[in-house]
Amino acid sequence: MSDIAITGLHVICPVGLTAAHACAAIRAGVSRMAEHEGYFCIPPEGPLAELDEGPEPVRAARVPLLSDDMGGAERISRLALLALQGIISETGFRRQDMQRAALLLCLPSPEEAVASWNLGPEFVNQLSRRAGVGAWALVKTIAEGPAGALQAMETARLLLAEGRIDFCLLLMADTLVEPERLTVLDESWRLRSLRNPDGLLPGEAGAAILLESRLAAERRGATILGLPGRVSASKEEVTVKAERWSTAKALCAAIRPLLEGPQGEVGRYTLCNLNGEAYRAHEWGLTQVCLARELPAEQALVHPAQAIGDAGVALAGVAVACACLSFVHHYAPAKAALVWAGSDGGGRAALVVRPYEGRA
């Protein structure tokens, strides 16, 4: 039985400005992929050069509330701000509650294009000021990609268990549509274009997840949207930047402990951050082969990047939101959702989310 509960969700993404709208659109297959005139892909060479009909704008999914000329740091700030303001508004989270709450801010790892965005302490302070909120009991920044965002769920569990806080807010924001970041992806042969048909389509999103003790949530009569289990994590040695395929050892190590229990209970319904790259598809395929005895034969797979593009860190939050709302609205194909995510740096993390079915 989970000892923590999700009592608030908010998502801001290209296909929805709330968690309910975004998850419904993703379920329906709605997409906002469109040509991004702010960046033109590197032209193909060799035999593919004859397909070149001039500058090729990248196809990307962008949040409609953000202007096209907004820079990377400001885009992430706005996405985080909108997610924070949204969850405060929807849950009735009060200023006095923040004094007993931890803020875990999940951001992209400080890679080449992101390092200059200065996503440090001043970024967090500015975010709180712009949101008009008071001081938090604890603030922690986690810059370890999507897997780090899932691992933040375990950090929240430990903080709540210590009793120093009553609430923990996970705030995730990321954008891959900023020209400087697109350049890095394109030069690394990771951006989908004529010269690289199995690359990713960039996107962006912000997500917020409010967590608290399950017992405390039940006592105050809060609406419980989902029950996250413990997080299992590992580290892949062969990253996406290597010249070899992933070994899938880390993803297997992260998922295998979660499959213990009744046969077929976990794994029938999976949500993840597959993004169109052959590297990740190969890793997931190899994982299914290695775990063939533990994973059920019939599986439903949801990967939100198909609708909103690769939204980096925020994809983890979007996946958790999709799992929770599928339970709330009774269209989940199973009674447990396996959620996993991989980071470019090699981190792999997974957890199981279950529906709330009343007091134990």
Image (cartoon, grey):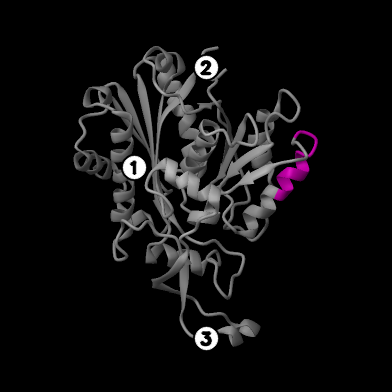
Q: Position of residue 255 (x, y in %)?
A: 65, 35
Q: Residue tagged by mark 3?
A: 53
Q: Are marks 2 and 3 in contact (CB under 8 Å)?
A: no
Q: Is residue 127 visible?
A: yes
Identity of the residue drawn at 62% across and 82% down: 48
- Whole-angstrom CA distance, mark 2 to mark 1, is 28 Å
Query: Residue type at mark 3?
Result: Glu
Q: Please tell me whether mark 1 sits on a helix, a strand or a loop.
A: helix
Q: Residue tagged by mark 1?
A: 83
Q: Position of residue 211 (x, y in %)?
A: 41, 26
Query: Residue type at mark 2?
Result: Gly
Q: Specify the segment rendered in magenta.
A: 285-294
Q: Position of residue 288 (x, y in %)?
A: 73, 44
Task: Please tell me which of labels 1 and 3 falls first in the chain.
Answer: 3
Identity of the residue drawn at 51% across and 49% down: 26
Quarter of the view holding residue 269? top right
Quarter of the view holding residue 136? top left
Q: Main secondary structure of the magenta part?
A: helix
Q: Is residue 110 visible?
A: no
- Whole-angstrom CA distance, mark 2 to mark 3, is 59 Å
Q: Please tell me whether mark 2 sits on a helix, a strand or a loop.
A: loop
Quadrant in the picture for the C terminus: top right
Quadrant in the picture for the N terminus: top right
Crowd tier of the residue under label 1, counting other residues whose Cα lies within 10 Å: few below 14, some 14–19, many 20 or above: many
Q: Residue tagged by mark 2?
A: 358
